[in-house]
Image (tube, rainbow, N blue to C red):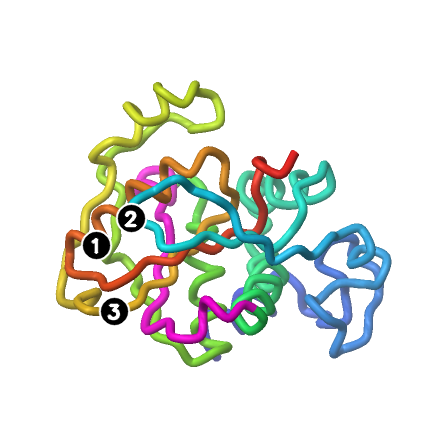
Amino acid sequence: MGLFDGLNSLLFPDNNICLFCREKIEVDAPYFLCQDCIDKLKFLNKEINIDSPYIESGIYSLFFNEYVREKIYKYKYYRCSYLYKTFGEILKQSIESVELFKNIDIITYVPIHRKRKAQRGFDQSELVAQYIGQSLDIKVSVGNLVRTKNTMAQNKLSRSRRLENISGAFKIKYEDEFFDKEILLIDDIITTGVTLNECGKVLLESGGKKVYALAITSGKNR
């Protein structure tokens, strides 16, 4: 039994349950959701200007509304780690649909700090990245891009404070893994893009060829 099979069977022994509302669904229901929950999502696969010299392009999958915000918040802060399956499926659909992602060599993710991961019990973007990599047979870099500073939450800061807060917050342990690779960088939500910019910087400085960003949603669409 793999990591994801064990996690899912522990939390949801009945596979015929919508992961958002817990109503009964068909075994092969898209995104592991019922149709009512799917209807509350607006799929965009929209390109976003991150305003970064290090990010080739950025895409987000879903329109940001209160329903999406609530589900991401629940995933991150209420130990609903099983939601990686739904968000992973949504991002997988974006990767399969967007031409920009056709030549991706390796997937990584915006990591949380090790202390926060210990408190939460998981890294939300890591779980999604691993799900996507396993589903699409793309190599995933785990634990190589690391957050060295336990930064404040970016959404509570002005843009200038965000830049100061995140500066120097990431490093690469083993540069060879990204050398001459086209890299897909996964995040949950794009706000100003300064965190993606900082990650993109260290990925290119490690020898990466190009960095593309993909997120579930973006507050910039409001």
Q: Which mark is residue 181?
A: 3
Where are the magenta residues, as a range? 98-118
Q: CA separation, marks 3 and 2?
A: 14 Å
Q: Is residue 221 left or right of residue 161?
A: right
Is 64 located above or below residue 105 in the figure? above
Q: CA separation, marks 1 and 3?
A: 9 Å
Q: Is residue 40 left or right of residue 8?
A: right
Is 12 located above or below residue 118 in the figure? below
Please report whichever mark, 2 or 1, sits nearer to the chain's N-terminal start. Answer: 2
The amino acid beneath tag 1 is Leu
Task: Report if the CB atoms under discs 1 and 3 are less than 8 Å apart.
Answer: no
Which image quadrant: the C terminus?
top right
**Circle 2 is placed at which residue position?**
54
Task: Report if the CB atoms under discs 2 and 1 are less than 8 Å apart.
Answer: yes
Please report whichever mark, 3 or 2, sits nearer to the chain's N-terminal start. Answer: 2
The amino acid beneath tag 3 is Lys
57 or 201: nearer the viewer: 57
Residue 41: percent from the left, percent from the top?
75, 52
Residue 133 magenta-highlighted: no
Instruction: Name the residue: 19% across, 46% down.
Output: 171
Residue 80: percent from the left, percent from the top?
59, 50
Hey, which quadrant is residue 114 in on the image?
A: top left
